[in-house]
Image: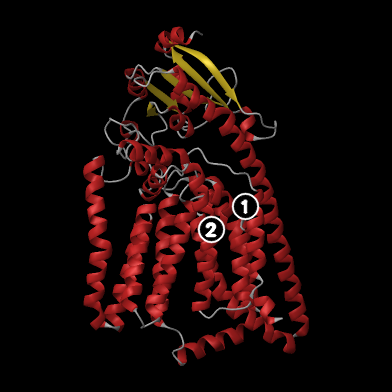
Amino acid sequence: MKNIIKHIYIIGIIYALAALATFPKWTVDDAYISYRYADNLANHSELTWNVGEDPIEGYTGIAMPVIMSIFIKLGLSPIIVGKVIGVVFFLLGGLILRSIFRLLKIQGLACSIPLILYFTAPFMFVHALSGMETILFSTIIVICVYLLFISITTEEHKGLWEIALFVLLLLTSLVRPEGVVLALTTIAGLVFIKLKYSRREFPPFTLRVILVYVIPGLIYFIWRWHYYGQFLPNTFYVKSSPDLFDKFSVLKLAFFSVLFLFIPAVGCLILNASNIKKVRAEIREWIGKSRVNPQLVIAFISIIVFVGLVLLQYMRSRLLMNFEYRFYSPFFPIFLIFAGILLHRGISAYKSVRRIKPVSFRFIGMILVLLLILQSSIYYKELKKYIFLKAGYKRMIEDEHIPAGEFLRENVPPSEWSIVIHDIGAIPYYSGLKTVDFSRLNNEELARGGMSKKEIIDYFYSFNAGAVVITSYKPDEVHQPWIYGDEAAAITADPRFERYELVKKYKADVSPDHPAYNYFEFVYLRKDLCEDFGS
């Protein structure tokens, strides 16, 4: 029986494989931004948005475009490769999580329950197939945590483990800028450990940090600063909120916590509270017999500081594409590590109640079963919702964005500019045209702000673009209920917009209850091009 419980998490893996097999093979529009950068790097040797123009850094992190460019060179589709990376690293993340539990001597249900929560979390399926770097970032964080624990708890090959850790920290920093925060808190924690517990290891440790992380990191930073001409990525300026805290980002974090963290946390607390005296006695025994590795405690503190700093910055940012908690989900495995630790002690406390308080034992058991049913129902409901949403989203990309991009590629001369307002992924990727991004991610002038509405409108018309694509929520007029909606309305209301003619409207074939039902792509061509087009 113990052996079955020990390996019950395998059910979660089987469930995950089945869910991934049936989940819509969707690609989020923003993923095509990285694919465009990767394509430009692979085919034109320029890591930029528009080939031949001033470089702009509109991707999340450099790692994904560079990785994709290698596969493009090999003749593989970045769309397929993105999904393979997502699925492989999702499964790898769970296996590394199990290795962490083994390292911490957490076994049985205390190990299996967090693993099942990981492998069955519905938002993980969304991100594994989205084509973005979310799961890659999440799993590399978990690997860094594992290497950190290994380098602290073992003396054998310590130097090699630390080198591996610094290599992964460097990679994390290149996948997302937030990875730099993980590197800083991890290195700071290790510096404290070396100075307090093993000063003689400090010189070789410092040399490893400098050679493996600091020097390569500085070389990259100086290169990107010189190449792009900006101290921070363009996406940082776009996502900066004018308020101290962005209410939507805070609300999203609250929803994520309530749906996926609250119930497991309550269950852990109930288990530990079932025999609080036993838990306290065991903690005192650990401390008294020095069974708690103080270096491991410092490592945990560095991880908590990392999560806290990044979440604080997220709450101060406008997270425009925080679909299915994209920015918060990479921290889910870290939560599960702490949950496993609490479960380890809590299950032991709960078992001790069975003999001395049988009624309490059964009552607590009933509560735990109810919590399990409640969390399972949330997982099921959210998974069902995500399948519906992503199936419709996939259809929207296939019926609207891709055809619009292909239409532009076939009917607009390559020398012409295009302007896209809002959906800046698949349309520019498939059109191949030089594109002005009015969502700002790939436009330095607009991202920095400071331009009046008149200046923005004049900036739009200064390109004399051959094609304009505008997303609308109404079929007969431009209507964008977003932060730049007034801008789009003002641009189309300007008399100069008469130089353009609406030649195509794209609508997805989705059910009326899907958000994409009232979602349209309007394609305008400059009138002289319409004559050549024959419209």
- Say the numbered circle drawn on residue 232: none
Q: Is residue 392 left or right of residue 425?
A: right
In the image shown, does 221 or 273 lie closer to the viewer? 221
* Residue type pointed to by label 2: Phe
Residue at 74% across / 75% down in the picture?
365
Residue 304 rendering spot, x and y as whole percentages: 43, 66
- Other-residue count near label 2 (Cα within 10 Å), few / some / many at <14 / 14–19 / ≥20: many
The local secondary structure at tag 2 comes to: helix
Residue 412 rendering spot, x and y as whole percentages: 42, 18
Q: Does residue 470 lie above or below 24 as drawn?
A: above
In the image shown, does 31 or 420 lie closer to the viewer? 31
**Disc 1 vs disc 2: Cβ atoms closer than 8 Å?**
yes
Residue 242 visible from this viewpoint: no
- Say the numbered circle drawn on residue 90: 2
In the image shown, does 137 or 283 lie closer to the viewer? 137
Residue at 39% across / 26% down in the picture?
433
Q: Does residue 222 lie above or below 353 as drawn?
A: above
Residue 84 visible from this viewpoint: yes
Q: Is residue 232 left or right of residue 523?
A: left
Sooner in the amino-acid sequence: mark 1 or mark 2: 1
* Residue type pointed to by label 1: Leu
Residue at 28% across / 36% down in the picture?
55
- Residue indicated by mark 1: 20
Residue 239 rendering spot, x and y as whole percentages: 40, 42
